[in-house]
Image (cartoon, rainbow, N blue to C red):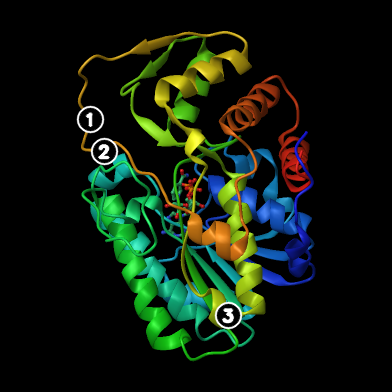
Amino acid sequence: MGKMVESDHLSLFAGRRVVVTGDTGFKGSWLALWLSMCGAEVLGYALPPKRDNDHYNLIGLKGVIRHVDGDVRDFEGMRKVFSDFDPEIVFHLAAQALVRLSYEEPKNTFDTNVGGFVNVLEVARCLPKLRSVICVTSDKCYLNKEWTWGYRESDELGGRDPYSASKAAAEMVFFGYMQAFFKDREDVGIGSVRAGNVIGGGDWSEDRIVPDSIKALQRGEPIFLRNPSSTRPWQHVLEPLSGYMLLAAKLHASPKAYSGSWNFGPDRNAVNTVRDLAERIISHWGDGRIETAVGSEGPYESKLLHLNCDKAFYSLDWHPRWDFERTVAETTVWYRDVWRGQPALPKTREQITAYMGGE
Ligand SMILES: NC(=O)c1ccc[n+]([C@@H]2O[C@H](COP(=O)([O-])OP(=O)(O)OC[C@H]3O[C@@H](n4cnc5c(N)ncnc54)[C@H](O)[C@@H]3O)[C@@H](O)[C@H]2O)c1
């Protein structure tokens, strides 16, 4: 049991209208459910879910919030939906979120992650009741210099693959819109948020280590690791989401004080290798084994990127709550229990409640 944690800011969402773009995706579905548990009236806007077993489908999110199928590249369509709903808070998560796919679909990646990003800000700035906007980019927006110390919000942006470049470009769009259209507004706060790899129940995306491992375990096959010694700052999906919600509340209360860019990453001790992760998954699953590829080559993928989160620690008093062990345990147990037939909605709610209560 951990200590009780401060969650007062979550009461802000009760009864407020909140848009979540990308609610059919992994992070968006957790966020939209969490917001609804806080009493928010949530409208989700995204492309339809891709798979029957997407978290969105497994938890029946469509029955919990309002959802509209829509494309962020469709400016007029999105403007109509957002204007009709008239939200106070917008969380923008919709994106082509996969590095590997960005090599196959660079144009779609830029159209969605940059063009769609412009569309969201353009629609948002004309919403009469708007009070805060959270724009989700990525830790990959930083030009990766493969150094060992953490990246700060003021560090150079850039990307060597289409996905990372699109997120760096989105950050440029964010900064331009903030300076040109939001800087002098007393009523609206706007933040861009940069988090790293997140893990948690219900992600089935291709080329992500946890879904790949779980799929292998379900089939009774070995977990195959391309780069077992690569390190990543693993964090549970609820960690950055808690930061996004805290920031949205702060922006709502004091737009001028909190507008800008924010890192939300794990503690240093959460930086572990892919092999560490796979071994912990196996131990919580109950059985399984690992196979590694020697010298296998994939498209360029950065080796190490660690976020310096001092700004969020000191200015927001935000801190990660679950260590690496707990993060992997919660994640694996979610998949294991749902695989064994437990309903997903109460499972996800139970983990959100435990996280909020500081357990
Ligand atoms: N998952 C991670 O580890 C991670 C790490 C850093 C940043 N992010 C960022 O967080 C956000 C959410 O990521 P995720 O892991 O949930 O991704 P995901 O692929 O699970 O979900 C993406 C969501 O965006 C929607 N979407 C994609 N293209 C769209 C379009 N043209 N119009 C409307 N909706 C569209 C999808 O329908 C889905 O709802 C993304 O912006 C992603 O880049 C994710």
- Distance of mark 2 from mark 1, alpha carbons? 8 Å
Left or right position of 38 against 201? right
How many residues crowd around disc 3 within 10 Å: few (fewer than 14), some, or many (20 or more)?
A: many
Q: Give amino acid for label 1.
A: Gly
Disc on the earlier residue, 1 or 3: 3
Q: Which residue sits at x=33%, y=28%?
A: 230
Q: Give whichever of 298, 312 is nearer the camera.
A: 312
Identify the residue under disc 3: 255
Q: Residues within 10 Å of mark 2 (few under 14, many from 20)?
A: few
Mark number, residue 114? none
Q: Are marks 2 and 1 in contact (CB under 8 Å)?
A: yes
Viewer-nearest of labels 3 and 2?
A: 3
**Residue behind mark 2:** 301
Q: CA distance from mark 1 to mark 3?
A: 43 Å
Circle 3: residue type? Pro
Q: Residue at coordinates 46% horizontally, 21% vertically from top-left?
A: 276
In the rendered image, residue 105, in percent from the top left (x then y), is placed at: 26, 49
Give the number of the mark in front: 2 or 1.
Answer: 2
- In the picture, the quarter occupied by the N terminus is top right
What residue is shown with label 1?
298
